[in-house]
Amino acid sequence: MPAENIVEVHHLKKSVGQGEHELSILTGVELVVKRGETIALVGESGSGKSTLLAILAGLDDGSSGEVSLVGQPLHNMDEEARAKLRAKHVGFVFQSFMLIPTLNALENVELPALLRGESSAESRNGAKALLEQLGLGKRLDHLPAQLSGGEQQRVALARAFNGRPD
């Protein structure tokens, strides 16, 4: 049976620097997100939202505390195990979108499905449907540099959904 809690965070702290130059970014974060639950993470610029999301996705480590994703503690996972866990359970849109510049919009969105083992036809059809739903049906063959910022954001969003996160 899948884990009831998708995300569990206890006593999370993240600091950078040392001694008198130490800067505390996150302190005492407690968070539980249940399967199917939607949350919003809000705060001022520089308050640690992106840092928290990077830690939750296993892209960064906290200084102390416990973080589990789908019931699996992240602290004892190597990068390969974290990457597999992300590919299977996490959909993520980065602030800079992280689109692959040499792939067109359709190919960027197809990528998670191909990495998940879907056939080329399945992945292409799913990616095309997502892009059409987001109003990008006529931009499938455009490279990221040929898209507006808003269009790039929608491509990144479609790619995150195409990963079928929990």
Image (cartoon, rainbow, N blue to C red):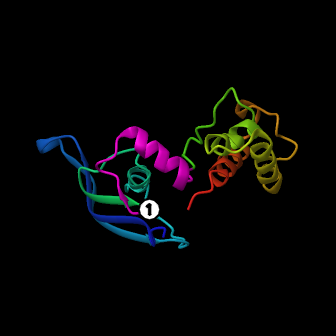
Instruction: Find residue 134 and report its image quarter.
Output: bottom right
Task: Please report the residue visible at 11 percent of the width from the left and 43 percent of the height from the top.
Answer: 19
Extreme-top residue of the structure: 102
Q: Is residue 71 magenta?
A: yes
In the image, is residue 148 above or below residue 35?
A: above
Residue 161 falls left or right of residue 76? right
**Residue type highlighted by circle 1:** Val
**x then y, percent, for residue 75:** 29, 50
Q: 28 or 9: nearer the eye?
A: 9
Is residue 22 depicted above or below 5 in this figure?
above
Residue 78 position, x and y percent, is 35, 41
The correct choice, above or below, for 122 with respect to 89 in the image is above
Residue at image coords 39%, 39%:
79
Question: On the rendered structure, is 60 left or right of 22?
Answer: right
Task: Name the secondary structure under disc 1.
Answer: loop
Q: Nearer the viewer, residue 1 or 84?
A: 1
Q: What residue lies at 44% left-to-right and 51% top-to-bottom? A: 57
| Residue toward you, 16 or 111 | 111
For residue 27, which quarter of the picture? bottom left
The residue furthest left is 19
Q: Is residue 36 magenta?
A: no
Q: Position of residue 101 (x, y in %)?
A: 66, 29
Give the farthest residue toward the right: 138
Number of numbered markers = 1
Front-most of residues 163 and 42:
163
Query: Which stretch appears magenta?
Result: 70-92
> Of all residues shown, which one is farthest toward the front?
1
Relative placement, left or right, of 64 versus 147 is left
Residue at 62% across, 45% down: 116
Q: Which residue is mark 1?
A: 70
The percent position of residue 118, horizontal first and vertical second, equals 69, 45
- The crowd level at tag 1 (other Cα within 10 Å; few <14, some 14-19, many 20+) is many
